[in-house]
């Protein structure tokens, strides 16, 4: 019975997308431990406080007047095992029994974690760019490929490129179809560098 439960849990993790250990985050982002310690527990990467659950890693982001570095205590209250933060001299919440991983820039760290997951899964990767018609093109490609390959689509969302959908890509994906648009100058190049498409 226990073996069956472990298989089911393993399958659920396998299908849910990216899970990161502290060491994987440190390795892929060139981060360092600012506070606390680390273990081998893996968790999802989330950056919206409403999505934080037990065992997640909360990525704090600064955008305009909003800075979620101000809500680290809330992320821990919601069950985060640790937070990934910009390198600073002080943090709003940094008790020694909680883990903070500091990086040079959390937006760059997000791209680096996307890159890590893309290379861990190793799908054929197809990037779609353009002023209009990106989503329609991806849907058409998916329609043509889905009978022969296990495909995953990554659309842009919440102003952070296609990161959310890329990190939802399950292991075993054979083709990743991703949308690359630009909010700021250089965005397409940064997304392309992170996901290294085989076809663009």
Image (cartoon, rainbow, N blue to C red):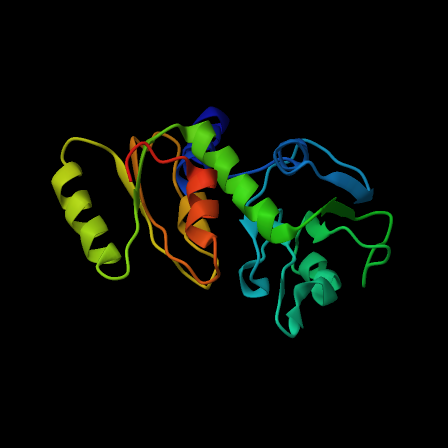
- Residue 67 horizontal/vertical position (percent): 67, 67
Q: From this viewpoint, which residue is outermost toward the bottom?
A: 65
Residue 58 shows up from this direction: no
Is 146 situated above or below 4?
Answer: below
Q: How many labels does the image show?
A: 0
In-image side of 90 versus 18 (left or right): right
Residue 90 position (above or below residue 117): below
Considering only vertical position in the picture, is 90 above or below 193?
below
> Furthest residue to the front?
185
- At horizontal 79% and vertical 48% (from top left) the residue drawn is 98
For residue 148, what is the image quadrant?
top left
Q: Nearer the viewer, residue 57 or 86?
A: 86
Residue 65 in the image, given as x and y percentages of width and height: 65, 75
Residue, far top:
3
Residue at the image position 84 percent from the left and 47 percent from the top = 97
Observer-nearest of 14 and 7: 14
As drawn, is 89 to the left or to the right of 41?
right
Q: In which quarter of the image is residue 77?
A: bottom right
Does residue 121 show up? Answer: yes
On the image, the x and y values in percent for residue 15 come to 39, 38
Q: What residue sits 49% from the left and 41% below the top?
A: 114
What residue do we see at 59% from left, 63% from top? Answer: 49
- Measured as percent of width and height from the top left, residue 105 is found at 66, 50
Answer left or right for 114 relative to 91.
left
Q: Quadrant of the C terminus?
A: top left
């Amino acid at each position: 019975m226990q073996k069956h439960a472990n298989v089911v849990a393993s399958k659920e993790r396998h299908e849910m997308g990216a899970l990161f250990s502290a060491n994987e985050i440190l390795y892929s982002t060139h981060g360092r431990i600012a506070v606390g310690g680390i273990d081998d527990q893996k968790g999802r990467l989330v950056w919206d406080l409403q999505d934080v659950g037990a065992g997640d890693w909360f990525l704090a982001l600064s955008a305009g007047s909003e800075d979620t570095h101000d809500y680290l205590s809330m992320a821990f209250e919601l069950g985060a095992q640790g937070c990934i933060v910009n390198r600073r001299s002080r943090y709003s919440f940094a008790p020694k029994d909680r883990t903070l991983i500091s990086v040079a820039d959390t937006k760059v760290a997000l791209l680096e974690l996307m890159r890590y997951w893309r290379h861990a899964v190793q799908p054929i990767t197809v990037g779609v760019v353009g002023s209009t018609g990106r989503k329609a093109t991806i849907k058409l490609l998916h329609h043509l490929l889905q009978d022969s390959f296990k495909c995953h689509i990554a659309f842009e969302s919440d102003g952070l490129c296609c990161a959310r959908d890329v990190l939802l890509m399950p292991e075993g994906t054979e083709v990743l179809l991703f949308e690359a648009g630009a909010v700021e100058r250089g965005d397409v190049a940064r997304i392309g560098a992170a996901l290294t498409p085989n076809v663009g």
